[in-house]
Amino acid sequence: MRLKGHTLKKFGILALAGTLGVLPGPTAHAVEIAIEPPTVECPVMLWQFLTGSLVFLMPAGLAMLATGLTRAKNASHTVFLTFFGCVIAIVAFWIGGFAVMRGGHGFFLRHLGDDPDKYGPFFWKAALLCVTASIPVGALAERWSLKSFHLCTWFMSLLLFPIFALWAWPGGWLARLGYVDFAGSGVVHAVGGLFALAGAMVLGPRIGRYNKSGGVVPITAHNIPLSLLGCFLLAVGWLGFNAGRGPESAASIATVTILAGASGAFAAATYMIMTTRKPDPTITLNGLLAGLVASSASAAYISPTAAVITSAIAGLLVCVSIPFFDRRRIDDPVGAISVHGVGGLWGLLAVGIFANSDSVKGCLHGNWGQLGVQALGCAVLLLWAGGFSWIFLIIAEKFIPMRVAPEVELEGLDIPETGLVGYPDFQLVSPHTSGFYGDQTRRTPRGK
C-alpha cells in the first residue's frame, strides 16, 4: 500500500506539471516568468527599488527606538502603532495620496497602466511616507489612542505629506522659487516632527511626567540596548534615504551621510560629558539621528567638512531643544520633535548657508537669496505641518478622543488597546513605577 500511494503521488505531480505546461493564459505565463525572469533594462528603476528597500528599514528602526525609550507596559502598543501606521500609509497613498502629490490625477494608480517602469516613483515615495507616519509615534507614545492614531495616519497620508511634497519638490511653487530639499529634511522629517509637536500640545503630557511646580519627573526607558539597535538600523536605512535621490553621485552622498551621523552623535555626547560627566546614550543616539536629519536637505550640495559642521550643530540643538520643550510641559518620550522637527528645519536653513555646488550655492558662497527662500520654506512648514495639524487635531478631538482613559494609561496600553502584552513572561508589580529617566520598571517572573 505504501508503494502504491507513492506511485500515485508521482503520477499526480507529473499530471499537474503537464497540465500547467499546456494551459493557455495567465497560468502558463506565470510558469514561463518563473523560469526565465525578465531582465531589468532601467537602472534607475533598480536603484529606486534597492534604496527604497533600505528606506523601509527606517520605520523598523523607529519602532525599536520608541519601544526601548518608553515603558515595558506599553511595548506591544508602541511597536504596533509604527507597524500598522505603515500599513495604513501605503493603502491611503495608493487610494489618493500619490494622486494628490501629482496634482490630483492618478487615484488608485490607474494612470500607470501596465508599464512596470512607471511604478518606481510610487514605491519610493510610499517608503518615505512610512517614515513620516512613524515619527509621531514616539513623541505621542504611552497615551495615544489607537482610534485617533488611525485617523491621524490617514490625514498625514492623504493630505499633510502629499501636499507639502507637491509644493517642495520639482514642479511645486516652492521649488520654482528656488527652495531646495534634496532628500527630505522638510518633506519627510520636519512634516512628521511638526505634526508630533502639534499632537503633543493637544494630547498633553503623560500622567506623572511633571510635578505641580512644573519640574520634570524622571520616567526611565526600559530597554536602552533595543533603542541603540534601532538607531543602527535607522543609520543603515538612511544611506538609501539620502543616496536614493542621487544615483549619479551616490558615493559622495553616502560619505556625507555617515559623516553627518557620526558628527551629530559626537557633538551630543561631548556636550553631555561636559555638562553631566556622562555621555547619556539616549541623547547621543538622538544626536546621531539629528545629524542625519539635517544632512538630508543638502547631502548632494555640501562638502564633507560642511556636513560635519551642519550635523554637529544639529546634535547640539538636540541637547538644548529637549529641555526647552520639557520646560514648556511638552512631553516627548523619545525626543522626536527635537530630532525631526528642529533638526529638519535647521537642515533646510543649512542649505542656504553651506551649499556649494553648480546648481545650489548658499550665502557663504555669495547667494544670500538661497537662505531667504529656505527660510520661507521653513515658515510654510511651520504653518502647514504645525499649524494646520494643530487645527485638524483640535477638531478631530471632538469626535474621536485622542488620549486613552487615565486608568488605561496607568495600567499600560498593551492589553486595553491591542489585546496582547509585549512581555508575556513577566508581569508588572505596579503600573505606576515604570518610566523614562527614573526608576526602572520592576518586573517579576510569572508564578513568583
Image: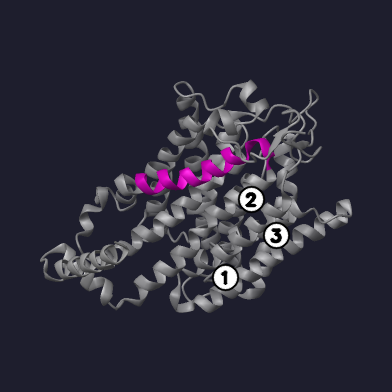
Please tell me which residue lies in front, 339 or 33. 33
Quadrant holding the C terminus: top right
Give how far across and how far down residue 48 sits, in percent: 40, 68
Q: Mark 1 = which residue?
A: 366
Decide whether the magenta segment is chiefly helix, strand or loop: helix
| Disc 1 residue crowd, few under 14, some 14–19, many 20+, Cα 10 Å | few
User: 154 and 233: which one is in front?
Assistant: 233
Give me the disc on residue 65.
2
Q: Nearer the viewer, residue 73 or 192?
A: 73
| CA neighbours of label 2 inside 10 A, class few (<14), some (14 to 19), many (20+) | many
At horizontal 37% and vertical 43% (from top left) the residue drawn is: 158
Q: Report if residue 71 lies within the magenta region.
A: yes
- Local packing at callout 3 (Cα closer than 10 Å; few below 14, some 14-19, many 20+) is many
Range shown magenta: 70-92
The amino acid marked with disc number 3 is: Ile
Quadrant containing the N terminus in the rendered view: bottom left
Q: In the rendered structure, which disc, 3 or 2, sits on the residue that comes first in sequence? A: 2
Q: Nearer the viewer, mark 3 or mark 2?
A: 2
What is the total number of numbered labels drawn onto the structure image?
A: 3
Would residue 100 be found to the left or right of residue 175 on screen?
left
Q: Residue reaching furthest right?
A: 277
Quarter of the image for residue 123 reads: bottom left
Question: Residue at left 62%, top 45%?
Answer: 337
How is the protein colored in the picture? one colour
Helix, strand or loop for disc 3:
helix
Q: Which residue is mark 3?
A: 313
